[in-house]
Each structure stands twice: as structure tokens, then as C-alpha cells.
Image: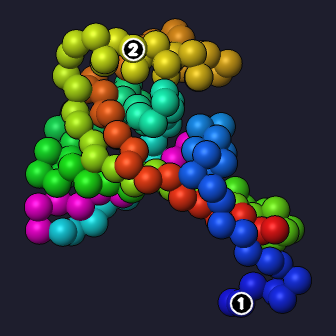
Amino acid sequence: MTVPATVKRMDLSPAVARERFAGAAVARLATADGEGVPHAVPVVFAVVGDVLYFAVDHKPKSTWKLRRLRNIRENPTVAVLVDHYDDDWSTLWWARGDGRAEVLEEGPERIRALEALCAKYRRDGQYADSPPAGPVVAVRVERWSGWASA
């Protein structure tokens, strides 16, 4: 499929990409293990400055020994993507944060991250009623990028 000639491309500045990213509800986390085998999963997140946080929460999982956490421990380089799709292609956009991830099992940064997650997702009550008990991941974003229809 090709993009119609009427849809023009515009690269987003890092500031605009970060702003659009931070306002999104869900992102896709891309990790790779030590062998370079990719893995992608959806995550809910909060952005504080240039750090993106997500947590292992109470949604049903078979274990907390998740592949995303193993991958981050083996290879901390990650990409996280948000996007907006619509049948009206003149409104399409995506934003990405590339950086290095770290698993936080405890400590003050983990607590601040949980506070940011609870604040962002308080409207639906999921985190406000039951804050995540699992590890938190901090992605220190080194590069914000994006694209939008102009």
C-alpha cells in the first residue's frame, strides 16, 4: 500500500515527539535478548522528563520472570513506540523514544515512578486502586523522534 500523494510527511522535533508520546495511553516496547532476538509487547507508561516508566502490574501473567525483563537485563537498549492511526491518513502520526532501560526492584526512583503511573492512570482506577507490586522499568530516553502527516 502506498500513501496517497495528498498526504505529506513531516518529521517531528524531539520536543513535539516527546509531548505526543507522553500524552498517549499505551506504547509498544521493543527489546532484544543478548542474541539480538526481538520481542515486542504493549505497555502503559508515564514520562517524567526524559525518563519513561512502566511497571509489571497485576494483570494476569504466568510469572514475573518476564521475557521483557530478561531481555533488558541482557541488552538494555530498547525502543518504545506510540502511534495514532485513523482512516483519515492526514491525521496519522507516530513518536518513538530510544534509550537504555534499567529494572528497578526497589528504591526512591521506583516509588516516584509508581506515583507518576498512578497519577496518569487514575481516571480509569486501575493503578489508583491497586498500584503495581512488581518491578518498574526506567527507560532513559536518549533520542525522541517521530513523524506526522503535514
Q: From what the image shows, is residue 2 above or below residue 120?
A: below
Q: Position of residue 79 (x, y in %)?
A: 39, 56
Foreground of the two, 68 or 106: 106
Q: Quadrant of residue 2?
A: bottom right
Residue 78, horizontal then vertical, whole percent:
32, 54
Q: Residue at x 46, y 13 (%)?
A: 115
Q: Which residue is mark 2?
A: 112
- The answer to whether residue 87 is seen in the rendering is no
Q: Is residue 27 left or right of residue 111?
A: right
Q: Give the dominant element type of the magenta stretch: helix, strand or loop.
A: strand
For disc 1, the marked residue is 2
Which of the labelled discs sits on residue 16, or is there none? none
Q: Which residues are magenta?
A: 26-35
- First in sequence, mark 2 or 1: give its number: 1
* Residue at the (30%, 27%) spot, across then down: 136
The foreground one among 1 and 115 is 115
